[in-house]
Image (spheres, helix red, strand yellow):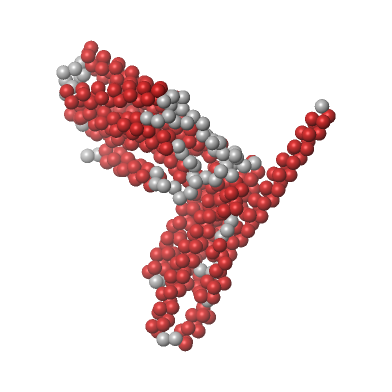
Amino acid sequence: MSLLFYSFFGLIGLLLILFVWLIRKPRWTAPSSAARGADDECECRHMAYLPQIRQAFSDSDFDFLAKNVSREVLRRIRLERRDVALAYLAALREDFQSLLRMARAIATLSPELDTVREFERIGLTIKFAWQYRMIRWKFLAGTAPLAQLHGLSDIVSGLSVRIEAALNELGERAALAAELASSMNRRGLGAG
Amino acid sequence: MDEIDVFQRVLWGIAISLDGVLLVLLLKRKNHRVFPAFFVYILVDFLQGFVVLASYLVWGFDSEIAGRVGWGTQAFVIAARALAVAQICGQVLAKYRGVWALAKRLLLATAAIVLLVSWAVARGSWQFAVLNADRGMELAVASSILILFVFIRYYGVTVEPAVSVLAIGFFLYSCFHVLNDTILERWLYNYSKMWNLVGLLAFMASQSLWIWVLRERQSATTREPKLLPEGIYNAVTPEINDRLRALNDYLGQFWNVVRKRS
């Protein structure tokens, strides 16, 4: 049997698997208006827990516990903090996805798209998903240091605030332009 | 005609009848206005059945002329199928102007690349030229539908169930056709009768799906989304991409630290 013969079977098998994955129920659908998308997506509510997360992951906190509690208690605390770290990572991913949903909603409702930017975002999404999985597996295997997690959330929260501000500004500009156009029309009608 | 089994003749008759049922349903429910290219495809396929049947009756199943008539008319069927798939893609995405412009380029590029690759990797002899062209076209149709569903999923586009089922029918049939052609290429003469039979069964499965979904009248108009002003995308998207990249870089640094320590 030739390699070509099997490669066509392999290719069709791959297409069928991909197709089944694609026709699963989607987790989100395109919004009917931009405003709804912008309101929903900028929440990033997990950022509110940042101070507590930072405290839990600080080196000084670990040092203090290591000196003052038994090994058993320290082990249990480490496990609990690992769970917190995993939940924190998941929350960050949720925030990442919220921002991504907003980007896709804007793209869906835009009259023109930039191919490079769209592909760049797909690449970033794949990269994030891969890194997230690897870090998560490291945590589950107990080999990842918890202290490195803080700082991630600064990037996400900063992004949300700036995008929200940009959207508001653009909304105001669009409203102003519409108002100008309508007043010019009225003047035109009056003159005629 | 005696060379064809009774069972196969019966199946052939059923397939042509199912085409007839589809045509009647399309006309009766006025769905031919919603899916004109699909209507043309079914009509061409229906007519091809009679032309091929006539050629078998006149020249015999194993004759070279009947073979040429079969493959020659198949070119029209495949072209009509490609048009029907193109129309489905347009029906789903055209209302999102930006996404459709991007998808159109990608769909055309995918179809062209798949056709070229499948032609390049196939056996070079002219004996298999028609078979390879047929397989290449079917592979291009399957890939295009897959790309369409990638866009639907990625951008969260809502699709009418009927359009979705039509696309699924095309995709499954094209996949099956590629496999069938690949087997035929390997065991050309020993497999030709089985190839006809298996192809018929696969097509009948798709026909049943289409009949099921077209039994009801489909609405011709879909709600048009209100698009954003042009500036929004150009102002916001680079910002989002920059931040996503920054987040990725941070996650990458974090991953490097994790890897070094462990």
- Residue visible at 22% across and 14% down in the picture: B57
In the figure, residue A158 lies in which quadrant? Answer: bottom right
- Which quadrant of the figure contains the C terminus of chain B? bottom left
- Which quadrant of the figure contains the N terminus of chain B? top left
Q: Is the residue A147 above or below the residue B56 in the image?
A: below
- Residue visible at 51% across and 75% down in the picture: A56
Indicate left or right for B20 with A109 as reference.
Answer: left
Q: Nearer the viewer, residue B262 or A104?
A: A104
In the figure, residue B101 lies in which quadrant? Answer: top right
Q: Is the residue B59 above or below the residue B207 in the image?
A: above
Residue B66 visible at all: no
Name the spot of residue A138 as percent of width and height, x first: 41, 67
Name the spot of residue B24 as percent of width and height, x first: 36, 22
In the figure, residue B62 lies in which quadrant? Answer: top left
Name the spot of residue A3 as percent of width and height, x first: 27, 41
Q: Nearer the viewer, residue B124 or A180?
A: A180
Q: Nearer the viewer, residue B214 or B65?
A: B214
Indicate left or right for B241 with B48 as reference.
Answer: right
Residue B89 visible at all: yes
**Residue that protrudes farthest toward the top in the picture:** B58
- Residue visible at 17% across and 23% down in the picture: B6
Name the spot of residue A69 as percent of width and height, x first: 44, 86
Indicate left or right for B99 with B63 as reference.
Answer: right
- Residue visible at 49% across and 46% down in the picture: A29
**Residue that protrudes farthest toward the right in the picture:** A191
Indicate left or right for B139 with B202 as reference.
Answer: right
